[in-house]
Image: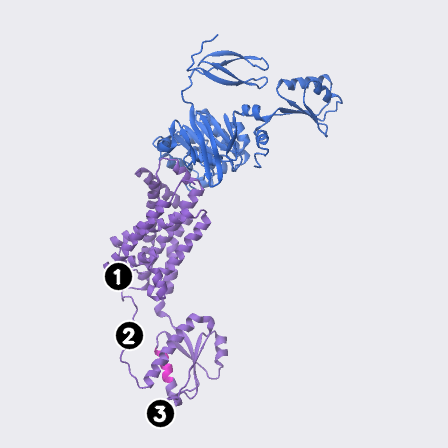
Chain colours: A blue, B purple
Amino acid sequence: MPSFTWDTMEEKQVQCPQCSEIFSIYGNPGERKVISCPHCQIKGTFTFSTQPPSKDQSAISVTNLKKTYGDLVAVNNISFSVKKGEVFAFLGPNGAGKTTTVEMIESIRTPTAGSIMILGQNIQTDFNSIKEKIGILPQEFHSFDRLTVRETLEYFSKIYKRRADIDEIITAMDLKTKEHTLYKSLSGGLKQRVGVAIALVNDPEIVFLDEPSTGLDPKARREVWQVIAGLRDKGKTVFLTTHYMEEAEYLADHIIIIHKGNIIAEGTLNELIQQYGGPSILTIKNCTHPGIISLLQEKGFTVTNKENGDISIEIAYKDKILEILSLLRHEAAEFESVDVHRPNLEQIFLNLTGAKLRES
Amino acid sequence: MNPRFILNDFIASIKHWTRSIGTVFWTIAFPILLILIFGSIFSGADDIQYEFYVQDFDDTEYSHTLISVFENISVLDPIIVSTSENITDYMEAHDIPAAVVIPQGFQETIIRSFSDPTASVNITYYFDPSQATTTSVIQSIVMNTINEFNLNLSGGHHVIGITEHTSQSEEFSFIDFFIPGMIGFTIMTSCIYGSIERNTKYRKDGILRKMLTMPVSRTEWILAKMLFMLFLSFVSTTVILLFGVFVWGLNIHITIISIIIIIATSFLFSGMGMIIGRFVKDEETADMAGGAITFPMMFLAGTFYPLNQMPAFLQSIAQVLPLYYVNEGLRNTMIYGNMDKTLYNLFFVMLFAIGFFAIGAIVTKWKED
């Protein structure tokens, strides 16, 4: 029985590799624990980080934030916090209040009500000192057309007291071959990479990226994602607003879904799927076995038989997939293919609002 | 205050400017083109002669005398038309703007009028209404000439005579008058449009939002941009003066006050541009708003011709236009050397500069609603 030191004890959420169940474990810094999944009982080990958790893990703390324009409530009394070192995604359709919120945090807009703390400092009173610690890529940012990439970075860098090495940024952003190219001659993806690079010229602790991949083609979008993933690896806190659910799924450690100015869901991707996504669906395509549906129902599965011969089965845990496949094999059932559809953020948004993320 | 940022931004702005061949070309070529066009039009005003046609059905000593009076007027070039021609057909066929027909019996009626005061004869003036500007000038001259002729015939004599002279001193030509106006006009357009671009394009591109989140103040940003606008103003002024001196033989003096007026003018119109840029959201509308202010001011503020040639109510309007005081201030210090008028106009330029720049700086905002 391990003894806990209460002021350094840490809670960690872990996900079972077998059945995807998420559960909490507790331990001290550096402690190695044997853990067991409460659902499928599979055993494993987990080692807690040697670094004790700091007293204040919040990079950003927002409390009761509100923004109204006359009768229109753009942001409705929302509260959340962003942990240091995580990629935090603010996901929602256009007009949901994402940019209004991030621009209030960046002090570009004045809140109607509420408080915002960045790195323990109040933005209303300490924003001048906060400016040195944050880097921002505004929405639809377009830099000076006729300065080169290097000149642009040097221009913005010289505004700060605290400066990162421009050469390192150019290398990290994979802009070496374009450093002497005029900004206006860059592709959309490269311009966004330069925009992210500009946000890094002061080696900020928090990087705000407002819709960084909007308007880019899929290849350029992937390139920008790689850059953002690299920021997390460097220990930066990233506040990302996006209406692309793939972007949030790919990058975010923590996701908030905002709709019509209200937070409608919050958590890690797995938490959101567990809580709001509903079951995964296994689809057996073109199955000709006459009795397979009743066999599955006898085993407790919820089964839908579609007109085209496809059979859809709701599955709560991954081990149920093996059970179904075993049954098909045992019955020598013939079928074309088996697909498993795991709920995604699009499905979650649909479940929560009745609307599709892209159509809202 | 962060002078390092101001210098950094100034250098970046110059790099940005010099890399657009089109922008540099038009900054230099625009005033030169205007000088060439307007200079050619107005500086040749002394050589203008209006052709007009005379058909003499009387063909007597008195009718010849009247024609010789027309010939003696320097701006008229009378041409005799044969009496066999139908004058209206002839005018239409030869695109003639105006003609005078002296009727048969012209001399006889005049002689008879010495004993019979009721006797009179009419000279007919024909004109083409589609050429209204030219014909109104000719008509005015012809009427004055005939009045003079009448006066002499009726035995009156002149007590008061008029000797015509231009309003300018002999040592100054039209181009000397015109060049200071061009300097004022060029600074006005570059500063107003420059400010509008910063406040609309940079807002749209997110640069103002970005600046708001960086350790640079709005004052530092505005001063940095003003430094660049002053640079552009002096580039334009230098180009105009060099062109004026080498192409038109300009007779002009660069004074300390002229430099002060140029600096104040840059602040004045940059402030005006900031005000426009603050209240107009998109670039296209901002350009139109800029044009709506600069073009009327260009014509109404005595840029191309002396204000006293305009109707009285337009002269009154000019008194409230900042460009009028800029033009007059520059002319008085650079051409006429009239210190009293220079200081009078400088006072108004400074007043407008402080007012517009202060309002512009106050209303320019980075924060979004």
For disc 1, the neighbor class at 10 Å (few under 14, some 14 to 19, many from 20) is: some
Calculate the distance from the C-alpha at mark 1 to the C-alpha at mark 3: 56 Å
Q: Which residue position is annotated with label 3?
A: B115
Residue bearing the label numbered 2: B163
Query: Label 1 belongs to which residue?
Result: B336
For the residue pair B271 and B58, the one nearer the viewer reads as B271
The reply to whether residue B300 is in sight is: yes
Nearer to us in this view, A47 or A196: A47
Q: Position of residue B215 (x, y in %)?
A: 35, 35
Residue shown at 47% from the left, 15% from the top: A48
Comes first in the chain, label 2 or label 3:
3
Measured Cα–Cα span from mark 2 to mark 1 = 23 Å
Q: Chain of mark 1?
A: B
What amino acid is found at the position of numbered circle 3 in the picture? Ser
Q: Earlier in the sequence, mark 2 or mark 1?
A: 2
Please tell me whether mark 3 sits on a helix, a strand or a loop.
loop
Question: What is the secondary structure assignment of the residue under circle 1?
Answer: helix
